[in-house]
Image (tube, coloured by chain):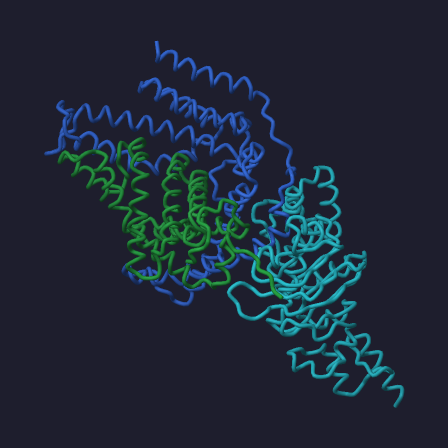
Chain colours: A green, B blue, C cyan
Amino acid sequence: MKKNRSLWMVKLNTASIALIPAAVAINYIGKLFAETLKLPLWLDSIGTIFAGILGGPILGALSGLINNVIYGLTVSPASAVYGIASIAIGVASGLLAYYGMVGKLWKVIIFGVIVAFVSSIVSVPLNYIYYGGQTGNVWGDAAFAFLNAHHVNIILSSFIDNISVDAPDKIVSSIVAFAVFSVLPKRLITLFDNSQETTTLD
Amino acid sequence: MQNISLYVNKKSFVHDVDFLTKLIYIFVFIAIPIISGSVIIGLLAILISLILHTCAGVLKKLIPIVALSLFVLLSVIIVQAAFIPGYHIVFFSLGPVHFYQEGLIHASLIIVRFLDILLVSSLTVLTTRPSDIVETLQRKGLSHRMGYVINSIFQIIPQMVSSMKTISDAQRSRGMETEGNLFVRVKAFLPLIGPVVISSLVGTRERAMALEARAFSADAKRTYFHEEMKYRYKTPVRIILLLLLVVSIIWRVL
Amino acid sequence: MSKVVVNNLKYRYPLTENLAINGLTFEIEQGELIGIIGRNGAGKSTLCAALTGLVPHFFKGAYGGSVHIDGINVKESKLSYISREVGIVFQNPFTQMTGAKETVKEELAFGLENLGVPKLEMLRRIEDALNLLEIDHLRDKNPLELSGGQMQRVAIASILVMHPGLLVLDEPTSQLDPQGTAEVFRAIKKLSNQGMTIIMVEHKIEEIAEYADRVMFLDNGKIVAFDTPTNVFSMNHLEEHGLRPPVFTRVCKGLGIRDLSGLYPVTLSEAVNEVQKFNESD
């Protein structure tokens, strides 16, 4: 990542806009893949993470938001509200990539853990409103029940419920997103850099 | 082409209602039960939404959407009724596990609120064409670039899925392993996904150029190929909905 | 004034060392059909991008010299403004469909909606383009479900509705089957006959020889030759620049058949003509 690119460039160029549908489609395909193979992961945010890495926090946030709008229109209307968590995933990915959490495997794993952490923080209030704090995942909810029964604070239980499912998922998703990023031609990557300027020859 | 949206293309008085009025309906029907704090009002809102689903002929499509949430709702009942400390009145027991009455009441509150949110949002999504939603929002100020993104996804995803199918059929005919342990299966699927993902990303460059050639970045005042959808009863329906909201607030305050 | 005036144009892509285009200077007149030829990496697509403003506005990079279309300086103008003056069609018909429209007629309307063209004017332009490209019967079809040749004609039509004065085609038939190629060439010929100024990159050299008024031969980002097809393909040492002249030219060169001014035929009909003269002179 070049340090001099502007982080919060709001006016996105057309290449970045055209990347959003691809990012959402990658989320969709990842999810399909996980379901087809019955993996114990969701893999439905690879594209959002990728968009954050490639285009920064704003593009990541937009990809996450639109991903859940589409999810609401195609699968589960009520879940569109989880778009807030997807936005957080996109923003976190953009910031982490910008601040250099890239390149080495251990860095990417930390990247995944932080993304999971951020998305869990945002998901907890939503889980609370919707389901009284649960996620619907067997292992996560078992942890929730166990902690609750042992008088652990409900917010902390809900957070642990969420992150115990999220962390492995986001680590694998981040590794995949970086793998894709590393095989893309560099000339393609510069197109998504909104701070590129034309220089003059002569 | 395969259609991924939940929209059911039918004719009914629910379909005729414009998207903004439906948004007001969503807001009002979620807000009233929460404001009133009453399970009965919540159940009433669910009942009305169910009747509207039936009138629109979309009840069948609602079933899979609700089914998707069955597991988490079951989990809510078990955890809330049996594992939250501090409850005393045992409602019933399954072996060593006691289900408490207070927990069950709390669980039913959660479930009614959840079903209410699910049903009102489903009704809107099932009876409004996605491109109409986008166009309505664009006329209200959504950037046309975002509108483009949403519309295009409905075509790009089926396109990608179908090219994945083509590749996977070819792989299978060459004897690719899709059975076996997890590692074998994951290894088998990577060659399917890799090319589709990479080519879709490389394709964004050309698509972006093609969009520029079609004045995508123009900041002129847009015009629309489609006439704006007009709903005849939009004003009375909106007034009734907002009146309901006002009444519920007054009822609560008094 | 000429339609297109290019003066000492130089361009380098970001993250690259070599100039993709290195000092091009030329002019093109209203109504000409120009064929651009040359091997891969010669700078053909970059030139197309420079004529439409994608270089430098889309690609950024380093830019020198100038391109004027109808007196408009491309570097100083916004892309959306240039898109009214210059239309461009690319290789891949699929990525040129917006993917956001469900019918061909809506697809054609996309650019016009962006430009804010009034509804009635929009309908009129769409009808004209549907007729011109002979895709009227496809108007209610989903653009993504068409054949390659049909899709490419929709791509051309959706540019033409914007009424550009110059049409740039970057290898418009390279991903099409023979039937699709024939459909597209017929459309291009029709447009040219109506007086449209067209610049076309094309590897199918026989077609260039047949249709182009002039041929620009690029290599290494520079112009090797810019002249009539006959003059360009009659040059010696073309192969050194990675160019195979049309088959008729090669045959006649091999046989030593040339016209009175010493030039070789480039199309089938010219070749037949010269061969007949050659036989008669025996």
Q: In screen coordinates, is B110 left or right of B25?
A: left
**B76 or C12: which is nearer to us?**
C12
Q: Which image quarter holds the N terminus of chain A?
A: bottom left
Left or right: residue C234 versus residue B112 is: right
Q: Quadrant of residue B32?
A: top left
Q: Position of residue C219 (x, y in %)?
A: 65, 74
Q: Is residue A59 above or below residue B6?
A: below
Residue B112's place in the image compared with B8, above or below, is above
The answer to whether any part of residue C172 appears in the image is: no
C81 in relation to A131, above or below: below
Choose top left, top right, bottom left or bottom right for residue C88.
bottom right
* Residue farthest along the bottom direction in this orientation: C282
- Counting every numbered tag in the picture gives 0
**Is A152 situated above or below C81?**
above
Left or right, C267 with reference to C139? right
Q: Which residue appears farthest toward the front when viewing the image?
A: A202
Q: Nearer the viewer, residue A128 or A51?
A: A51
Q: Work out which residue is located at the far right of the displayed protein and give it.
A: C281
Examine the rendering and report whether any part of residue C129 can be seen: yes
Residue located 61% across and 64% down the image: A201
Which x, y percent locates residue B182? 28, 59
Q: Position of residue A133 (x, y in %)?
A: 26, 34
Question: Picture coordinates of residue B95 (x, y %)?
Answer: 11, 34
Image quadrant holding the C terminus of chain A, namely bottom right
Point out the residue furthest to the left here: B96
Horizontal side of residue A131 vs C134, given as left or right: left
Q: Residue at x 53, y 53 (%)?
A: A15
Q: Nearer the viewer, residue A157 or B153?
A: A157
The residue that appears at 89% across and 88% down in the rendered structure is: C281
